[in-house]
Image (cartoon, helix red, strand yellow):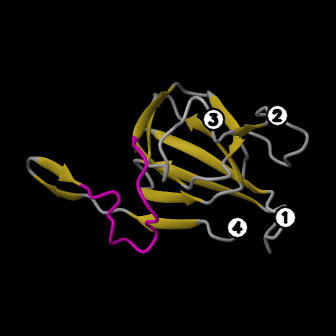
Amino acid sequence: MIRDVQLKPLTAHADERGYLMEILRTDDEIFEGFGQCYVAKNYPGVVRAWHYHRLQTDYFVCVHGMIKVALYDLREDSSTRGEVNEFFLGEDHRVVLKIPVGVYHGYKTVGTEPSLLLNFPTRPYNPQEPDEYREPYNSPEIPYSWEIKIR
């Protein structure tokens, strides 16, 4: 796994009323800080990629549907430089994915219904100085294809 990437399993506590599921706590081992929280609705097949941050860590949680998240480590000082990771997040795999500073990331909704992604970045978004450095989803600089892989 790419250095500093972490997964936190989530547990839904269910009863006849529904369920309650804690997502992220300040006393979690993976928690660094809180900047803001936002939700993104994503339609099936849409790819949102690639970007990385120089200042903020992201915490992705898919609370509805399923997404495929890909990461690419471009950090000069990283022992995993050049490595690619792929994760599936959502109703079938409830986890928080911690994406460290300097790691390109993107995601695609998989399945037939929209997904809802929550992100808890460690810094609030600053429109005057966005901490986002982008490449197109099909960049030849990143060795990853968003196509379905048959295993």
- What is the residue that sits farthest to the left in this orientation? 16
User: At numbered mark 3, what does the secondary structure look like: helix, strand or loop?
Assistant: loop
Whether residues under marks 1 and 3 lie with C-beta atoms below 8 angstroms apart, the answer is: no
Under mark 3, the amino acid is: Glu
Which residue has dot 1 on it? 76
Q: Residues within 10 Å of mark 2 (few under 14, many from 20)?
A: some
Q: CA distance from mark 4 to mark 1?
A: 13 Å
Which comes before the other along the chain, label 3 or label 2?
3
- Eye-nearest disc, 1 or 3: 3
Which comes before the other along the chain, label 3 or label 4?
4
Quarter holding residue 68: top right
Which residue has dot 4 on it? 2
Q: Is 23 colored magenta in this rendering?
A: yes
Q: Residues within 10 Å of mark 4 (few under 14, many from 20)?
A: some
The span shown in magenta is 21-37
Give x and y (percent) for residue 50: 72, 39
- For the point 68% across and 70% down, which residue is it? 1
